[in-house]
Image (cartoon, rainbow, N blue to C red):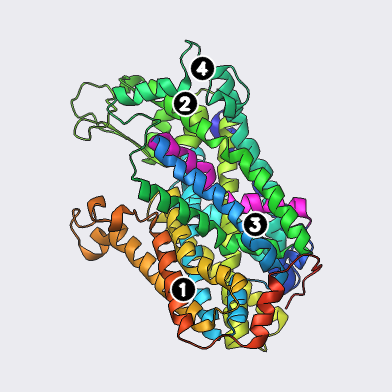
């Protein structure tokens, strides 16, 4: 069977599985809708957390970034992995002890302020919509190539599937759907990696094949370095980013992970604080399987790509090249009219443009793997994108229905009314997410990096100070969140979209004008520092929190033996 037939079969089967799970586990109460009833097992929650956390950026885009950036791409690997460790150790047990549905719920109660809750809701919406844009972009990339439909139709199909199981099942449906999605995405990621590792290095373990030798006896990375330098690129194993930018991007991704509301809410779905810690450990193991494999896939794909397209005759390119070309994600311009593909760093003579987001998806095709493997990777990419999109949509709907409508607008709303409000807000969020998927502001990992920066500069200081500082008050937290978010958002908009929105010249938004050499992807770290500084300054000038709030903080800090936390 051809690739498209296999794709219809495998993707169709996985979609039917997700919908079936959603029907089986549909939510009948707000507790089931927001936190899956609070009774998910640690193992299942660990798998669901891994699927929720490993988005299209992890599955599709991260290996593509490393493939093109080489050593510099490792900042994404380090930042996202370190961030999860930070989340598991510093935040998850304490937030679980607090026992609230959402991050704005924690912020509102900890800082005894509706204003603080409103700011947290705005931050959650900013972060979640920015993040979900990257997921829908990933859905569009997969559908446009493998189902050979337009990006618009691809995004529409993805929206429909997510809407169905996210609004019907809520967190309960999403949790068990994400368990299935983790199994699909990790199998889809590892199978081609093992295939290609055996083909190239005769080693079935990709992590070892990454440092292994090829048939001619040369090391894989040495060969890749030579190929890069022959084409005018920097050596694959050398870095070009400044040390400060590497540090700031890594830190933004780390603390941004720890502030992501859709990941934090996962730890409210288990019965006990102990279970939150155990599920965090399970999730770290499940995440490590993909993250330790990504650099190997990046190196395999880059080597095969260069050897396939370098100085090739355009008239005789493989079928996969033509298929991706129809999506617009590969573009060839025969500048000298000789019919050969010239792929070099020098933009004036380079004839080939390749979108970073295709590398993982095209990797099995470039390596001539069986058609069913190619289709499996498509299903894995969709599983990664849809699992995270569903979690984000739940955060958006909970922020609107629980934190805004129930807590601020209509405290007397019935449980059934709140449930319908949650589903309605999820429907609106799906439509907005679909728009961003059709008109994305960048490639997947770049868009997601912006979301992490916004989370780092807004949520992280408020959460960490809310847990570990009894003296931090509402005035400090509110001013800190607003200042961090506005600074980071303004910096990203200026340098990434200044030409389009404000008519700025390319020179004005060039890297030479970045503050201290910090890129927009890393500016969230500086925003976080501003948040901390403003919070402490305002705190020192305003009264301390009430005694009962300080007692609450003391109680949160000692989760050991707490047992089941109460839900409100």
| Residue 65 belongs to the span the image colors magenta | yes
- Mark 2 or mark 1: name the one nearer the start of the chain: 2
Disc 1 to disc 4: CB gap under 8 Å: no
Rendering quarter of residue 209: top right
Q: Which residue is labeled 3 in the image?
A: 89
Question: Mark 3 or mark 4, which is nearer to you?
Answer: 3
Q: Which residue is labeled 2 in the image?
A: 366
Disc 4 to disc 2: CB gap under 8 Å: no
Question: Mark 3 or mark 2, which is nearer to you?
Answer: 3
Disc 3 to disc 4: CB gap under 8 Å: no
Relative horizontal placement of residue 550, taking residue 343 as reference (left or right) = right
The secondary structure that dominates the magenta segment is helix
Cα–Cα gap, marks 4 and 2: 20 Å
Question: Mark 1 or mark 3, which is nearer to you?
Answer: 3
Cα–Cα gap, marks 1 and 4: 50 Å
| Residue 92 belongs to the span the image colors magenta | no
* 209 versus 477 height, above or below: above
Q: Position of residue 291 (x, y in %)?
A: 57, 40
Q: Which mark is residue 47?
A: none
Q: What stretch is highlighted in magenta?
A: 41-69
Q: Which residue is labeled 4 in the image?
A: 213
Residue drawn at the location 72% of the way across and 54% of the way down: 279
Q: Position of residue 201 (x, y in %)?
A: 55, 18
- Mark 1 or mark 4: name the one nearer the start of the chain: 4
């Amino acid at each position: 069977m051809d690739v498209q037939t296999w794709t219809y079969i495998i993707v169709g089967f996985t979609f039917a599985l997700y919908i079936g799970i959603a029907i089986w586990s549909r939510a009948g109460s707000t507790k089931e809708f927001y936190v899956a009833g609070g009774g998910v097992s640690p193992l299942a929650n660990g798998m669901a957390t891994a699927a929720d956390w490993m988005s299209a950026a992890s599955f599709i885009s991260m290996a593509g970034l490393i493939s093109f950036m080489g050593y510099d791409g490792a900042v994404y690997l380090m930042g996202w992995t370190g961030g999860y460790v930070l989340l598991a150790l510093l935040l998850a047990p304490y937030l679980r002890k607090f026992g609230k549905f959402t991050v704005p719920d924690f912020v509102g109660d900890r800082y005894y302020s509706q204003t603080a809750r409103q700011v947290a809701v705005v931050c959650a919406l900013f972060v979640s919509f920015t993040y979900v844009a990257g997921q829908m972009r990933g859905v569009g990339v997969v559908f446009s190539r493998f189902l050979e439909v337009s990006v618009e139709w691809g995004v529409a199909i993805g929206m429909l599937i997510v809407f169905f199981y996210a609004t019907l099942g809520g967190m309960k449906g999403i949790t068990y759907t994400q368990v299935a999605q983790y199994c699909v995405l990790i199998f889809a990621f590892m199978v081609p990696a093992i295939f290609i590792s055996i083909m190239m290095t005769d080693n079935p373990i990709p992590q070892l094949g990454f440092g292994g030798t090829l048939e001619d006896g040369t090391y894989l990375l040495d060969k890749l370095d030579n190929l890069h330098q022959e084409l005018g690129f920097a050596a694959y194993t050398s870095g070009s980013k400044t040390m400060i930018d590497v540090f700031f991007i890594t830190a933004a991704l780390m603390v941004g992970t720890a502030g992501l509301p859709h990941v934090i809410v996962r730890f409210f779905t288990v019965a006990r604080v102990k279970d939150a810690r155990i599920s965090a450990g399970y999730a770290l193991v499940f995440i490590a399987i993909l993250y330790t494999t990504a650099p190997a896939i990046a190196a395999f794909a880059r080597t095969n790509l260069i050897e396939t397209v370098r100085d090739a005759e355009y008239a005789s390119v493989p079928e996969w090249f033509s298929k991706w070309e129809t999506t617009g994600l590969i573009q060839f311009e025969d500048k000298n009219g000789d019919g050969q593909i010239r792929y070099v760093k020098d933009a004036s003579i380079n004839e080939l443009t390749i979108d970073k987001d295709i590398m993982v998806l095209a990797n099995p095709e470039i390596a001539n793997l069986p058609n069913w493997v190619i289709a499996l990777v498509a299903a894995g990419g969709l599983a990664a994108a849809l699992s995270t999109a569903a979690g984000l949509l739940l955060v958006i709907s909970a922020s609107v229905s629980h934190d805004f409508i129930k807590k601020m607008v209509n405290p007397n709303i019935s449980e059934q009314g709140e449930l319908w409000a949650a589903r309605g807000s999820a429907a609106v969020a799906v439509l907005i997410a679909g728009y961003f998927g059709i008109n994305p502001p960048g490639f997947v990992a770049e868009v997601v990096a912006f979301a992490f920066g916004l989370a780092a500069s807004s949520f992280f200081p408020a959460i960490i100070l809310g847990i570990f500082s009894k003296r931090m008050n509402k005035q400090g937290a509110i001013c800190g969140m607003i200042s961090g978010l506005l600074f980071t958002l303004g910096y990203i908009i200026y340098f990434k979209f200044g030409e389009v929105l404000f008519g700025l010249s390319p020179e004005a938004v060039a890297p030479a004008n970045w503050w201290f050499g910090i890129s927009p992807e890393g500016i969230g770290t500086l925003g976080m520092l501003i948040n901390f500084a403003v919070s402490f300054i305002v705190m020192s000038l305003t009264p301390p929190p009430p005694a009962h709030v300080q007692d609450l903080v003391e109680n949160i800090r000692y989760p050991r033996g707490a047992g089941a936390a109460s839900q409100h």
